[in-house]
Image (cartoon, rainbow, N blue to C red):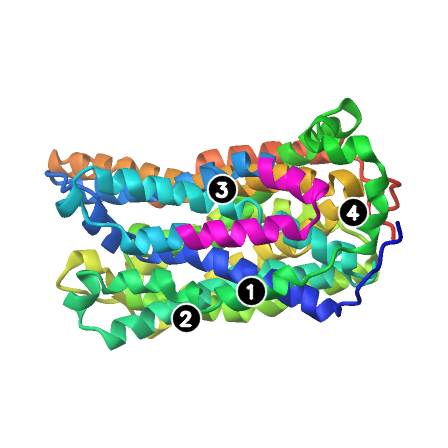
Amino acid sequence: MTTVFKKKSLFTIVLTAVVGTIIEWYDLLIFAILMPYIADTFLPIIPGATGKNTRYLLTLITFFITFLCRPLGSFFFGPLGDKRGRKAPFLVSLVLMLIGSIGIACLPSFKMIGYWAPVLLIIFRIVQGFAVSGEFAAAAVTIGEHSPINKRAQYISMLVMSPMLTTVVAIWIYGIAQRMMSPQTFADGGWRLLFLVTLFLFPLSYYIRKEMTESQVFLKARGSLEVMIHPIKQTFKKENFKKLLLFLLTFGIGGGITIACYLLLPIFYLEHIAHIAHSQAEKIIVYATLIMAPFYYLFAYISDRLQIRKPIIVSALILALIFIPYLYQKIYEVTLTHVVVATPNTLAGVLLTADGFKWILLLLTLIGIIVGLFNSIVSSFFCEEFPTTLRNTSLAFIYNIGVGIFSSLVPILLTYYNDQAVVANTKALAIGQPIPYPYPSMEGFTLWKIVLATCCVIVLLYHRSNRQNKNGLEY
């Protein structure tokens, strides 16, 4: 039987992947932005001085559950993409994500249905986590297989930038919604409308994904029937599993906790740990993201021009290990010395001076640039290192464990260790003792540095990448 290849512009392929990624990451990030309202609506009131922090941590764990389910989803969507085609995970994940968002938007409150509210909230978050596990790997593989070798990282970097830029979109929509409603109306349920925004993009995204064609390199590889029928079995065979495990232990986990330092951590760190006023924290994140976004394309362009991946990626991990904890410490210090006034409601945070705002914007932008040096290139590197018939399964497995589990642990552990250090400092002051933790925000970074340092050592000692390998993408 003769296969007929439809011609689709590369722009359409990239647009298809980016729009879907924006939809799915919007639903994840808007949850993070709305966590105080979600906690007040779906969780029981916890008495005591630490009750508010406990509820916040429980909501943060609910956020984490979405990422925890992603490795499970990779065992479904990865093989689906290798067996049925790259667009199959696109369509299924998009529908599941929409179901989860509508479910959260319509979920009755704790006052109405009691403990069923948090239980159903977790179920809908599990659905969303399962859905998003099928999105990014399929998108990166699809763009990689359609791209020319001398521009592959550049095109994939457009996909990688989309979760970052989605942060800007989510904050922008959140700001518009707050201006359109009174504070009481928004808190009483107006915030639920933000989970329904993706309904407007869903028909367009579903249509262009349904019309998407498979790459010729994938269709030509379908002759290997054993691999196509049993992609998981083939993925975990010795010859592929060694590389898979090495990539997971190094670039997957190391990359996951590095990416989290800009993709997930800022909104939690600035507001909950540094206690910056919500309005200023959001502006800092938006401005920093817009400033550092062009660097993604620049780094990808340099990588394509020089035809190198691994040296840049390893350099980025080492730079992250050295500088990111230091930069976050400086952010914390600025909030102690450049404050206009604490707002009457301490939960609302502190207002920064103009100089303090500029300093934190600069520091967060530098963090984003370091993360971008790694994040803009690593997906194209993964695509080039695994065979076509196992590429989607392998990349889904690495990405969903590294970015899925380990990246989501970063804000949880940093928040937990910070809160414990603050409690210890408060007890010490109460009895007239010197505080044991001058910088409580840094306590969580100790474990972070140990894990990332271990990943860097493994990369330098054991990883041998062949840029012209016969298994990878050679069109």
| Quadrant of res 84 | top right
Camera-nearest residue between 99 and 328: 99
Residue type, numbered disc 2: Lys
Q: Amino acid at mark 4?
A: Glu
Which SS class for mark 2? helix
* Residue corresponding to mark 3: 130
Mark 4 falls on what kind of element? helix
Mark 1 or mark 4, which has the lower sequence index? 1
Asked if marks 2 and 3 touch (Cβ < 8 Å), the reply is no
Residue identifier under label 4 = 384
Dot 1 surroundings within 10 Å: few (below 14), some, or many (20 or more)? many
The residue lying at 88 percent from left, 49 percent from top is 1
The percent coordinates of residue 141 (x first, y second) are 70, 51
Magenta-colored span: 76-99
Of marks 2 and 1, the one in the foreground? 1
- Secondary structure of the residue carrying numbered label 3: helix
Residue type highlighted by circle 1:
Ser
Instruction: Name which of mark 3 and mark 4 comes first in the sequence.
Output: 3
Q: Earlier in the sequence, mark 4 or mark 2?
A: 2
The residue located at (28%, 60%) in the rendering is 192
Asked if residue 227 lies in the magenta stretch, the reply is no
Pinpoint residue 456: horizontal percent, then vertical percent. Answer: 64, 37
Q: Regarding mark 1 in the picture, which secondary structure is present there?
A: helix
Q: Measure the alpha-carbon separation of dots 3 and 1.
A: 19 Å
Q: Which residue is mark 1?
A: 205
**Residue at horizontal 81 percent and vertical 34 percent from the top:** 225
> Which kind of residue does numbered mark 3 sit on?
Phe
State whether the magenta stretch is mostly helix, strand or loop.
helix
